[in-house]
Image (cartoon, helix red, strand yellow):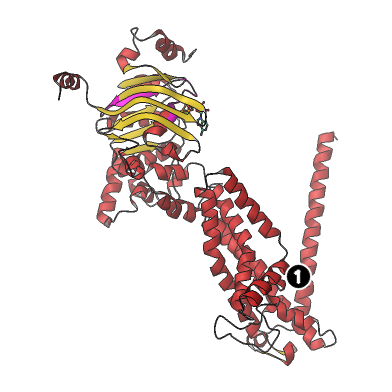
Amino acid sequence: MSRRALSDRAFRLAGYIALGLCLCVLGALLFAIAYAGLKAVSFDFLVMPSKDFGAAGGIRWQIIGSLLMAVTASALVLPFATALAVYRADMARSARVKRFIDLSVFSLNGIPSIAYGLFGLIVFVNILGTGLSWFVGSIILAMMMMPTVTHCALSAMQSLPSGVRENGYALGLTRRAVITRITLPQSLHGIVTGLMIGLARAIGETAPIMFIATAFSGVSLPSGLQGPVSTLPTHILALAQQATNPDALRNAWGASFVLIGLVFLFSTAAFIARTRLNPYSERL
Amino acid sequence: MKPELKLVSAQTPPAAITVTDFSAAYGDVNVIKNISLSVPEKSVTCLLGPSGSGKSTLLRSLNRINDDVAGFTTKGDIHIGESCVHKGFTDVTRLRAKAGMVFQTPCVFPGSIAANVLFGLKGRKLSKIEKAQITEQSLRAAALWKDVSHRLSAPASTLSVGQQQRLCIARALAVTPDILLLDEPTASVDPVSAREIETLIKTLSKDYTIIMVTHDVRQAGRVADRAIFLCDGEVIEQGPRDHMFSKAALPKTRTYLLEEFCDC
Ligand SMILES: Nc1ncnc2c1ncn2[C@@H]1O[C@H](COP(=O)(O)OP(=O)(O)OP(=O)(O)O)[C@@H](O)[C@H]1O
Ligand SMILES: [Mg+2]
């Protein structure tokens, strides 16, 4: 066998091994959580409020709390991230400004989530005196999602066929019209994908909202912007700490299963959005 | 008005575009060097010249689409009719609607054929009937109506490349320009479609002032009423086609037109 064919084979093999490992990890995780979690999950589990600090009852308010924060965070991040991406793609002219935006987005992405949590605690709760507030938690989550959404939106905008904008300008469209009729609709898939990936990550976060937005148990819907909610991740954390109580552990697995289901839902939505909403996807 | 001027305008049609002492640069690199030229109304003027001679740059200065290129600067005047391109049009979008542009590679927008034709009009309030009329007129003018009248709502991306280029022309016509700027409009289409587009350009020149960049000297011979020979940012010679393609032309022009070679 020639050297070329040999190295070709070696790379192929390495690829298969890597893929296999990846699938093993995913499979093991899903199996463990499904195996332990499905024992707890039932219709009642999904719709009943929890009792006994979570050891009994369901996770109604935790699901609602998680979704409320995630949806609010998305609504908050969407205009900012889109505006930043549009500015970077269609308006910023100086190379230095562009580099600065890229660098900021990348650094923001690298900040550990606990740092966001501390930032929220110090700035909002201590300095601004908001007290525990789910809305402040959503703001923090929105800040965490910002780099992901911006990056995905920007990539989509930058990968539009060269010339689409120029063709728009040549027809006499204003810059605003080019942005609203060409850039935004044609990169919608990137914006939605970014939002869904961001959501999938944000909904599983504990650290950034632990100090500022959530309570471990005994809360239902907040009456305004203030007041905590209960979320799935914090609920799981609280349950998992009651290591001697088998009911609490079982429900922790159950809640994890539901959480993973939600993440999976958002990831799938991201996957679908990426191709379905892309006007050029069939042509690529 | 002075009598001499009248005499001149009696001989040649009035100039739709006049370029006076015009220079253009990307950063420090001067690519158009103090040129002057005029383009008569309702005719085809071909811009000829070797690669890099500044043909596209000149064309893209006429509708100021190069304004968006970082570092692009110009000196001198371009007049379209009576108005100066730079000072006369405070709203550059009006200039661009008046001088439609079609590029080398056809670029259709996602969406239907009809939507593409109407793309430049989306800001205006039009009734369904008006929209249908504009669509039909523009497609007929671009010699595409017969090919697509039965599938106006099909995606524009399903058209052949040659048809897409004619759709781009129809799209430019829909915003009712006076001038068409064509930058190598047949460069990316097959020879048969190229001939169709040439015929179309010839027909359109009855109603529009057309400036067309082309590399194909024989194409210029077929469609041009006038030709401008540009080399290294300077106008070597300009004049009616028959003059440019005859022995009376400057030696440099003749060499380029015969051998597509230029030593400037
Ligand atoms: N955006 C730009 N930035 C810097 N220089 C440019 C830019 N566009 C064109 N140039 C330079 O300007 C000169 C003229 O370019 P132009 O595109 O006008 O030539 P052309 O005559 O259209 O050539 P071709 O026939 O190959 O299309 C070239 O030397 C080119 O490298
Ligand atoms: Mg060119």
**Can you see residue B186?**
no
Among the 4 quarters of the image, the one containing residue B221: top left
Q: Tell me where residue B6 appears, x and y as whole percent.
A: 16, 22
Task: Please give the range of residues in magenta.
Answer: B39-57
Give the answer, above or below, for where B153 lies relative to A228. Answer: above
Magenta run includes residue A97? no
Name which residue lies at 82% across and 53% down. A17
Q: Tell me where residue B246 appears, x and y as whole percent.
A: 33, 10
Question: Which chain is indicated by disc 1?
Answer: A
Badge 1: few (under 14), some or many (20 or more) residues near its Cα, within 10 Å? some
Left or right of B208? Residue B108 is right
Q: Quadrant of the N terminus of chain B?
A: top left
Write down the residue under mark 1: A30
User: Element under label 1?
Assistant: helix
**Can you see residue B101?**
yes
Name which residue lies at 19% across and 19% down. B8
Magenta run includes residue B51? yes
Among the 4 quarters of the image, the one containing residue A205: bottom right
Q: Furthest residue to the bottom?
A: A52
Name which residue lies at 40% across and 22% down. B34
Number of labelled discs?
Answer: 1
Name the residue nearer the viewer: B189 or A273: A273
Give the answer, above or below, for where B110 lies relative to A208. Answer: above
Q: Tell me where residue B105 appears, x and y as whole percent.
A: 46, 36
Q: Please state which amino acid type lies under the numbered disc 1.
A: Leu
Name the residue nearer the viewer: A266 or A178: A178
Name the residue nearer the viewer: B33 or B137: B33
